[in-house]
Image (cartoon, grey):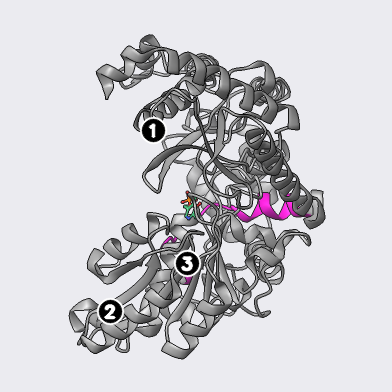
Amino acid sequence: MKGSNKQSKIAFGRFTRNEEAAEVNMAHPIEAAADQLTLDPENWNELRQLGHRMLDDIFNHLETLRDQPVWQPLPEQVRQAIREPLPIAAQGEEKAYQDFLHDVLPYTTGNRHPRAWGWVRGNGTPFAMLAEMLAAGINTHAAGGQQAATYVEEQVIAWFTQIMGMPAGSSGILASGGTMANLLGLAVARQAKAGFDIRREGLQGAQQPLIIYCSTETHMWARKSVEFLGLGQKSLRQIPVDENFQIDLGALKQQIQMDRAAGLRPIALIANAGTVNTGAVDDLPALAKICRHEDLWFHVDGAFGALLKLSPRYEHLVAGIEQADSLAFDLHKWMYQQFEVGCLLVRDAEAHAATFASQASYLETTTRGMLADGLSFSDRGIELSRSFKALKVWMSLKAYGATLHGQLIEQNIEQAKYLVSLIQGHPELELMTPRSMNIVCFRYRAQDVFNKELDQVNREIVLRLQESGEFVVSGTTLNGNYVIRIANTNHRSRIEDFEALAAAVVAQGRLVAAEEPVFAIEG
Ligand SMILES: *Cc1c(COP(=O)(O)O)cnc(C)c1O
């Protein structure tokens, strides 16, 4: 260990001052490096071997996913095991890993499985997992500055600017997910359209209440965000939707006029490019026009729908998205990346920076050195310390190309169409909305079950499918009816999986419908 001390002296030998300092250090009471604490392994080969074993184990796990349950409830003893007292003394890496294998690995949300279609969750990919490992290994601080991570993230943003058809030079940032990307977009909208210096005055400086528009089908991030941005729920006008779950344009225009007449200040509109419930896409070209006419910021939530731009066959479904002032989407949904990664694009780079750019003496921008050109990503969002999320996206696009990603999206849509054909071909299954993109809403329906009981029957089917470990689907309520809902952002699903799902829903439905007492109690 004294040897390694010498080595570093040789490596830095040209700096005479350091050498002197090192000599001074030698007189320090802690004389040998061996006595000093670190979290690096004492024996690199041992940890290396454990690392190789972990990699083999997780690859074996991913390779045999089909043989495992999608999901299973946590047994009480596993909960108890996780609730252990604070480890004061070291238990060792091997023990920590064994506990992971035993208490964690079997009990997850299972969205990596080929038969998981609940909510909207991607699978992750083995290669993006490896990229995440590399990002964790180098552990770079991705706020900006002179380092490759800055250029990699800028490049990923430039690629998605191109994919989405927004003008070159648009600004952007990778965020933890759709919620954060949308929130940041709305913060830019508020700053750009408030009509006063909101960074200085805050909302206390507002002469008129600021108003934002969306539809009743907009994801809950919008309400959370207006609450968080200090605008409050009352500032969010949730406009009704038509029979296709698209925002009602007439009602929107009328509401804007009423708000202006009441002395309020409309500032932004949130459009949906793929709603979470049904995959509905608002009339984006018409909304863009209304926004220009009314001087509203045009924000688009394209959490998964925006990724249709990767598909030549389906990109027309989100035509108009390129007119967004700001556009948020996830890469951990329909680009199947590991959690977490979402993206915000902002057409007006200056407006983006004007919302977040901040200075501090300890982060002085220089023309040379590591902070040269400043902390560009810290200046486009809230976070200062950031992980290198861009690496997995950059490496995945290089490894597999945009074309394959578009084809996978098309495959998911074809699979959803196939499921619809199975539903329509079965007398006990009922399609509840026209399929939109990759989302199918349906229910089990038996002749002798009353409509009000169907809600309970289908709720029960969803839970039993989850508990069986065979499928994870979710449910939602549409037009007052509970429906089984699948969102297919799964690159592992095969056509047989949807055949199995349709058969399982019918089988469970018959069982549940025959068990009337259950509903007598719950109803
Ligand atoms: C998933 C989703 C969100 C939220 O994204 P997260 O990554 O889960 O934060 C927002 N809008 C829509 C339409 C979504 O599907």
Residue 431 occupies which quadrant of the picture? top right
Q: Is residue 359 visible?
A: no
Q: Quadrant of residue 284?
A: bottom right
Name the one closer to the observer, 465 or 1.
465
Residue under numbered circle 3: 378
Residue at 42% x, 57% y is: 217
Residue shown at the point (67%, 69%) measured from the top left: 164
For ligand 1, tell me if the residue under mark 3 lies within 8 Å: no
Determine the CA span between mark 1 and mark 2.
43 Å
Name the residue located 48 percent from the left edge and 35 percent from the top edge: 474
Q: Quadrant of the C terminus?
A: top left
Where is residue 161? Give x, y as percent: 66, 71
Q: Looking at this view, is 496 or 264 the one in front?
A: 496
- Name the amino acid, label 3: Ser
Disc number lying in front (1 or 2): 1
- Secondary structure beneath dot 2 equals strand
Q: Going by the image, does 98 lie left or right of 238?
A: right
Instruction: Identify the amino acid type marked 1.
Output: Asn
User: For the magenta stretch, what is the residue range?
Assistant: 380-397
Q: What residue would you read off at disc 1?
A: 451
Q: Amino acid at mark 2?
A: Leu
> Which residue shows up at 62% across the image and 27% down it?
502
| Left or right: residue 377 compared with residue 226 | right
